[in-house]
Every structure is written in C-alpha cells, then in structure tokens.
Image (cartoon, rainbow, N blue to C red):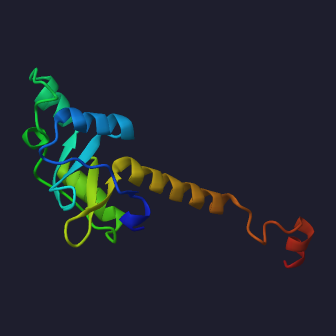
Amino acid sequence: MKVQEIMTRDPDCCLPGDSAQKAAKIMKQADVGVVPVVATGLDQKVVGIVTDRDLCLSVVAEGSDPASVIIEKCMTGKIVSCQPNDDVQRAAQLMEENQIRRIPVVDEDNKIIGIVSLADIAQSVASRAGETLKGISEPSAEASKPRSEQESKD
C-alpha cells in the first residue's frame, strides 16, 4: 500500500513568521496536533513542523505570550518526510527511527501535498486485517454446498 492511499491531503500550514497562537488556532480548528511550516504562502516548500507539544514546552511552559512568539522560534527544523509513492512500511520505519508520529508527504520539489500519521497507518492495517479476517471467515464454495453434495465426491 502506498502513502498516497492513506495520507491526509492538503493539510493546513503556517509560515515561519506566524505566531504560535495562529498555529494553535489551526490545530484547534482542524482538530490536529501538528502543522507543517512552509517557506511562503506561494512556495509550499516544507521548512519545519510545529506540534502541540512544541507549543506547550516552548511557549506555554516558558510563560511566553503565544501571540508574540513566532513559529520559527518553536518549530522543529529537522524535517523527516516521505513521498506519495513510498510504501506505507517505509513511512512506518521513518516514524520508528525518528520517534515521531506524523510525517509530511512532499513532492519532488519538497512541497507539501499531504501528511501521514501513525493513526492513518494503524487504521489501514486494521482495515486490511478486517478484510482478511472477513475473507477467511466466509465459507468457501465447497463449504457452502450441502453436506450430501460434499460427501458424494468421496
């Protein structure tokens, strides 16, 4: 399965100069815990990522004013990303190696096109497991025949 099959497309983003408060409002409105940070409104190249944890530890715990702290000061600049045609297992491996739960999905120019989360991967695996279980649980053509027809072959 490919990342593009399970990713959330066109996530809301913010800019390095936006306030921490703006990022928090985006998170609240979209009901997410992460916001990709892009270079400019026109240039959607990913330059960072800000999480609810970043805001909590770098802004709230420090007693800073969220309206005056800019994202650039609290975002994570180390970007771990994947591409839409990457296998879901590759995304899971990146998450494990980097101890992260969400990864921006970027195109060849490093521009944001989506985001994939650990929950997305877990749901896709659970869905596949459910489909497999359903297939295993359904009677085969032979098993669905009346017993007398099955015995006549023997």
Q: Position of residue 138 (x, y in %)?
A: 71, 61
Is residue 31 visible in the rendered structure shown here? no
Residue drawn at 89 percent across, 66 percent down: 146
Can you give x and y, in whole percent of width and height, for residue 133 in the image?
60, 57
Above-or-below relation of 16 to 28 = below
Q: What residue appears at the point 19 percent right and 66 percent down from the top-left corner?
A: 110
Q: Residue at x 21, y 61 (%)?
A: 42
Residue 106 seen in this snapshot = yes
Q: Name the residue nearer the viewer: 25 or 88.
A: 25
Instruction: Please state if 143 lies on the left or on the right of 13 as rendered.
Output: right
Q: Where is residue 62 drawn, in percent x and y? A: 9, 23
Q: Is residue 82 left or right of residue 1?
A: left
Q: Residue at x 52, y 59 (%)?
A: 128
Residue nearest the observer in this picture, 79 or 27: 27
Furthest toward the front, the residue is 42
In the current view of this chain or complex, which residue is farthest to the right? 148
Residue 67 image position (x, y, % from top left): 16, 29
Quadrant in which the N terminus appears: bottom left
| Quarter containing the C terminus | bottom right
Q: Is residue 47 left or right of residue 2?
A: left
Q: Is residue 148 left or right of residue 55?
A: right
